[in-house]
Image (cartoon, rainbow, N blue to C red):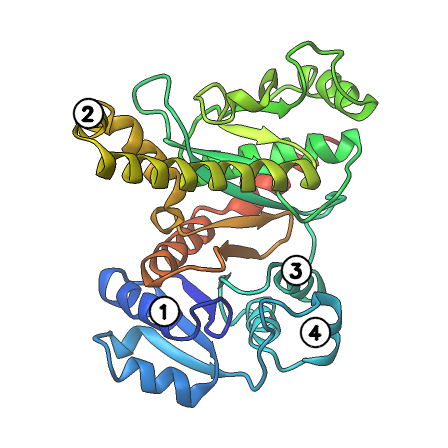
Amino acid sequence: MRTIAIDAMGGDLAPDEVVKGVATASLQTDIQCVLVGDERRIQEILERVEYNPEQIDIHPAGEVIGMAEEPKDAVRHKRDASILVAARLVADGGADALVSAGNTGAAVLACARHFQVIPGIRKTALASVYPRQTEYPGQDHLALLLDVGATIRCDAIELVQFALMGGAYAKRVSKVASPRVALLNMGTEPTKGSAELVEAHRALQALSGVNFIGNIEGNDLVKGKADVIVTEGLVGNVALKLLEGLAEVMVDMAGAAAEESWRWRLGMRMLAGGVDRLRELADYTTYGGAPILGFQNLFIKAHGRSPARAITNAVKVAAKAARDGVPEEIALGIAGLR
């Protein structure tokens, strides 16, 4: 049985949807949950929904960091903010992992302030999972992209470490025995891209224990070629937002076109599978959240607009990652680099 600390006040729909999501998790699983935030507001929401009181505790926090606040200033001045209190709770052993849908920058800084970095890790990485095509039976329909915002620029060693961290997460959480790892680049040739990418390609190719398949391009992101895609944070963040935006636009356009003409409605029925895949890509509630990797403690970042369903799934992912020893798997891989 794992205990998960949840930042009840973080996110566009907090605390209502966060608390409701945790209430559902308490009914569906044996996960122990600690809601961190305004005790009175949390209790009022719980009283309006069905939940298992034996699996939910409330840990008070007197301040909130808003989604639009500047992260460094907010973390510096709001020491009793829910995300900081929740991170301290995990660091002190009061919970096994942390979940938040709040301000991403503040969440990363909270982890950096209170969590220990795994020995040997140079930079932590914010990962993201997203649906993609599959190429063989049993392949996980979710791919892992990292980094998507914790860094801006990376050197070759840091990219190699991202590959090891992403591979460890895929092994333990997605149960992929030998995840296929790729570098996101402007071409598939080993000599393409910056000097850092060329050096990282060479290092990964020579590294035993990593199923490195080489470079992939942007049009391969939604295909099943790679299970783990490695890039620096600036590029990864742009790629992720582009995927989300395109999926939402295409679903909206398909619906609008179907309303205009019976021919379009007929065509949409024929393309139902593809539209469903686009809708799934746009629906982040199905996969809950994604990890920050590289710390000895686990943090799962849920989407800022997460409704209750997404929070429930984020809590489940956090418990699974803690149970299956993701930090320990990463530590083993990093130790092998020395």
Q: Which residue is mark 2?
A: 263
Q: Is residue 4 left or right of residue 124?
A: left
Q: Which residue is mark 4?
A: 74
Answer few, some or many: residues within 10 Å of disc 2's Cα (few below 14, many 20 plus, some between 14 and 19): few
The type of residue carrying mark 2 is: Arg
Q: Is residue 72 left or right of residue 35?
A: right
- Viewer-side residue, 123 vs 289: 289
The type of residue carrying mark 1 is: Glu
Q: Earlier in the sequence, mark 4 or mark 2?
A: 4
- Look at the image and tell me in which quarter the N terminus lies: bottom left
Q: Earlier in the sequence, mark 4 or mark 1?
A: 1
Residue 303 placed where, x, y %?
48, 55
Q: Earlier in the sequence, mark 3 or mark 4?
A: 4
Instruction: Kindly give the residue lying farthest to the bottom in the view shown.
Output: 40
Q: What is the C-alpha distance between the residues marked 3 and 4?
A: 10 Å
- Viewer-side residue, 302 vs 28: 302
For residue 25, the mark is: none
The type of residue carrying mark 3 is: Gly
Looking at the rendered structure, the secondary structure element under dot 1 is helix
Instruction: Kindly give the residue lying farthest to the front in the view shown.
Output: 260
Name the front one of labels 4 and 2: 2
The type of residue carrying mark 4 is: Ala
Q: What is the C-alpha distance between the residues marked 4 and 1?
A: 23 Å
